Image (cartoon, grey):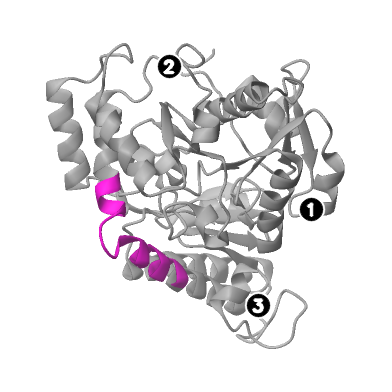
Amino acid sequence: MISALMPTFKRVDLAFEHGQGACLYTADGRRFLDFGAGIAVSSLGHGHPGLVKAIAEQAARVMHVSNLYRIPQAERLAERLVAHSFADSVFFSNSGAEANEGMVKMIRKAQAQRGHAERTRIICCTGAFHGRTLAMIAATGNPAYLEGFGTPVDGFDHVPFNNMNALRAAITPETAGIMVEPIQGETGIRQADPQFMTGLRQVCDEFGLLLGFDEVQTGMGRTGKLFAHEWYDVTPDIISVAKGIAGGFPMGAILASEEVASHMTAGSHGTTFGGNPLACAAANAVLDEILAPGFLDAVEETGAFLGEALAALVRTHPAIFELARGRGLMWGLKCRLPVARIQEMATRSGLLSVTAGDNVLRLLPPLIVGKDECREAVAILGTVAGTLESETGKSCAGSEARTDGKQGPIQSHEEIQA
């Protein structure tokens, strides 16, 4: 007999009663380090006093009024995001998939208003993940997500990630824009090459295309900058944001330049819940923390520390782990043994994580995580690796072992990002 909750998720048999900081606790008192953060959502961790206070106070006043009326909390949030980004205007939604849908609509609308109504197609990259709506599974292009849902929504062309020659070859008179993640999360934390990102801006300027970045997972401080594209010194025309923007309250946003946003006139797009007072109160509380002096520097520093610790873990257990890659507090540990087995053992040992493609274990702790908690997480993974080595009869090849075909030890944080 089917469960009351539709069986669309393979849930671990764990239920958490409360959380504090980077930890979650079950009703029987078991403690878990949360290095999944609700899939990069719980940006301020659990029980953050500022976020809890903002939500409780706003809920006691008014939670929802609809966008038929002014929403001062949304106006303030939009002004702050504009002040700290490339954007001139913001639209609030409820999720990352909605933000990506809106981004595609806005790119098409801007091209039509420019006099190019034929430009409707969006170039995306293989290995991407843009959401689960009908249009966004077509944009993602993964056959596993498309199966059983009929003919894919038209309008999306796919090229290999980091391949500018293939991208240029895919441009046609019907191409409206490009939608790319600066770091592909679902396929194993794969970063865009700097030359690829620079080339995206150049090719958009050359052909009159609009450049959109999907920053649903990489945005709101996850990589040590407010938005990941800032690392590349490349200015987009539009980006999507969600996940960590409101620290766990469902919310998404589309940030756009005036050139794009000015065409979104009354009635051209809409939402019932998006940008309501409660969501924006939560997001403003999150932004208070992220924009505080030193916060993003701390994310970058702690992320570098975690990356070095993971690199050492790979060197110590090369029979279990192949490499570590990532930036800020967005890391992937590529495994030699099945990642599901490693995740299961880590969970039993008190470490929560997320799997990804390419046999990668994803580590996405809250942005407030400390170095001691990072040490503890890596120690748990080391213990798991030791147990697996004993079970499989494999041992480490020494701390100087390489797994990338090069000679000598891994030397630097920049190298493990490569």
The quarter of the image holding the N terminus is top right
Camera sees residue 58: yes
Q: Which of 209 and 30 is in front in this view?
A: 209
Secondary structure beneath dot 1 equals helix
Q: Residue 31 location, x and y as percent?
A: 30, 52
Residue beneath the point at 34% across and 35% down:
78
In the rendered structure, which disc, 3 or 1, sits on the residue that comes first in sequence? 1
Q: Name the amino acid, label 3.
A: Ser
Query: In the rendered view, does 100 fall on the left or right side of 22?
Result: right
Earlier in the chain: of badge 2 and badge 3, it is 2
Circle 2 SS class: loop
Query: Badge 2 local density, few (<14 within 10 Å), some, or many (20+)?
Result: some
Q: Image check: 147 left or right of 330?
A: right
> Mark 2 sits on what residue?
271
Q: Quadrant of residue 193?
A: bottom right
Where is mark 1, residue-wise?
Answer: 164
Residue positioned 75% across, 43% down in the render = 126
Instruction: Specify the segment rendered in magenta.
Output: 287-304
Query: Is residue 42 visible to the viewer in this orientation of the structure?
Result: no
Residue 323: x %, y % from top left: 64, 68
**What's the distance in space between the residues labelled 2 and 3, CA to CA?**
56 Å
Q: Position of residue 208 (x, y in %)?
A: 71, 38
Q: Is the magenta stretch mostly helix, strand or loop?
A: helix
Residue 54: image x %, image y %?
Answer: 18, 37
Instruction: From the image, tell me which residue sits under label 3.
Output: 395
Q: Do the residues labelled 2 and 1 touch (CB within 8 Å)?
A: no
Query: Three-letter amino acid code at disc 1?
Result: Met
315, above or below 358, in the image: below
179 w.r.t. 269: above or below: below
CB of mark 2 within 8 Å of CB of mark 3? no
Q: In this view, does 274 lie above or below 305?
A: above
